[in-house]
Image: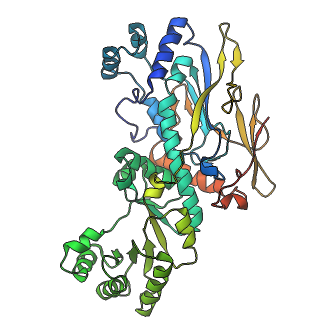
Amino acid sequence: MSEREPSAPTASTALLTDRYELTMVDAALKAGTAHRRSVFEVFGRSLPGERRFGVVAGTGRAIEAIEAFRFRDAELGWLSDNAVVSDATLDRLSRFRFNGDVRGYAEGELYVPGSPILQVEGTFLEACLLETVVLSILNHDSSVATAAARMVIAADGRPLAEMGSRRTDAASAVSAARAAYIAGFGATSNLLAGKRWGVPTMGTAAHAFTLLHGSEEEAFRAQVDAMGVGTTLLVDTYDVMEGVRTAVRVAGTGLGAVRLDSGDLPVLVGEVRALLDSLGATGTRITVTNDLDEFTIAALRAAPVDSFGVGTSVVGGSGHPASGFVYKLVAHTDAAGGWVDVAKRSAAKATVAGRKFPSRRLSASGVATAEVVARGALADGRPLHVPLMVAGQAVAAHLGAAGVARARAHHAAVLAELPPSALSLGRGEPAFPTLFA
C-alpha cells in the first residue's frame, strides 16, 4: 500500500451490523466451524426498475469500512451489557481484524443481473461479519450512481451538478455526491464531498438572498460585486423576464449564467434564451434546477439549456429504486480442508454455487454482448474482477480522492461499451445477457 491522506472513518464500523451476524459467529465458534475458509459473493438478482444496466459504486468506501471494522472497548462493552454474544465470543471479537481478500468489479463498472460484483474470502467469522456494512454501502451508492448515469445519458453531454444534500441524511449526502460524480456528474454543492473525495464544488445563491435585499437589482449587484460578472444569477424569485433584464443591466452582457428554478421549463428556457440574445448576452448560459430527473432532463434535450442541477431524484427520491444486492455464501472448506461449493435452492431465491470468474464479452467493434460468469477458470472477454484487498490490506489505488477519479474515468470508458439500445430510459431487458459457464 502506498501512503495516502486518511479518508477512512476514524470510528469503528463494527456495529454497523445486524445482530444475526454476531449470533451466527457465536454459534459457529461454539461448533468449531468459524475458522473454515469461506467465499461470499455480492450480486443482484435483477436490475432495479427494469433498467438496462447498473453502475457499481461505493467500492472504495466499502474497503475503507472493512479496514475500520474493529471491536473496541465501547463496542465490546455494549455487546456485553446487552448479552448479544457469549464472553468467549467477546474475547475473540476483541482481537478481530479482517485478514482476508476482497476482489470485485472496479468501481464505476457496469453490472447486470447475476454479476458477482464483490467476492469476500476469509474465515467464516471474518467474512460473515461484514455482510451488513458492505451491503449498506454498495446498495446505496450503486443506486445513486445508476440513477446519475441515466441522467448523464439524458443530458447528452451537457454538465450536471448534484445538489441533493438538503433532501437526505447528512452522511448519505456526502456518499451520494461521490457516487454521482463517479457516474459522470461534474460537480456537487456538498463541501465535505469536495474535501474528502475531491469532487468539484459549486454554488451561488438561493431565493433567500434576493428576498433579503430591498430589490432584485440590489441583490444582483451585491452578488456581482462579491463574485464577479461570471457568477450565476437566480432570476425567478419574482418575474422571470424582468429578472433577466435586471441581471444583464447589472452584470452586463458578460454575465456568466442565469438559473431557473421554476416554471414550464421547455417553454420558459426558450423565451429566456431569446431575451438574453436580444439583450446582447449571447454567451450567458442557462442552468435549470427545478425537481429534475432523467425524464425531465430528456424532455429538455431540444431546449437551449446549458447545464442542470439535480437534487432529490439523484440522492434517493421517489422512483429511485434500491439496487437489491445480496451477500451469499458460495463456497467453504470442510472439516478436512477441502473446498465445498454451496447454493440456496429456495424458490425465486436460488443461488449459483462456487467461486465465480466474470468477464465481459465484446464484439469486434468493442460493444458489450454478454456477461460471462465462469466457475473454475476465466472465460474469454474483458476480465472484470480486480484485487481490492489483499491479506486484509486495501489496495491504495481504490481509495480516497485518487480512487474516485480512477472510478470516474473507468465508468466513462465502460459506458462506451454499451449497445445503443441500453441507452433507452424506458423499462426493458438488460443491456446484455448473463451467461453462466
Can residue 72 be seen here? Answer: yes
Q: Picture quarter containing residue 240?
A: bottom left
Residue 169: image location, x then y, percent: 36, 46
Q: Is residue 350 left or right of residue 148?
A: right
Can residue 406 be seen here? Answer: no
Q: Picture quarter containing residue 339?
A: top right
Q: Name the residue: 66% across, 60% down.
A: 423
Q: Name the residue: 45% across, 81% down.
A: 268
Q: Name the residue: 42% across, 68% down.
A: 290
Residue 331: image location, x then y, percent: 66, 21
Q: Quadrant of the C terminus?
A: top right
Whether residue 97 is situated above or below residue 232 in the rendered picture: above
Residue 258: image location, x then y, percent: 39, 77
Q: Name the residue: 60% across, 50% down.
A: 49
Q: Nearer the viewer, residue 353 or 65?
A: 353
Q: How many marks?
A: 0
Toward the front, the furthest residue is 347
Whether residue 261 is situated above or below residue 162 in the rendered picture: below
Q: Nearer the viewer, residue 207 or 382?
A: 207
Q: Is residue 227 left or right of residue 429?
A: left
Whether residue 238 is situated above or below residue 32 in the rendered picture: below
The colour scheme of the drawn protein is rainbow
Toward the right, the furthest residue is 364
Residue 23: image location, x then y, percent: 47, 16
Toward the left, the furthest residue is 214
Q: Is residue 153 left or right of residue 13?
A: right
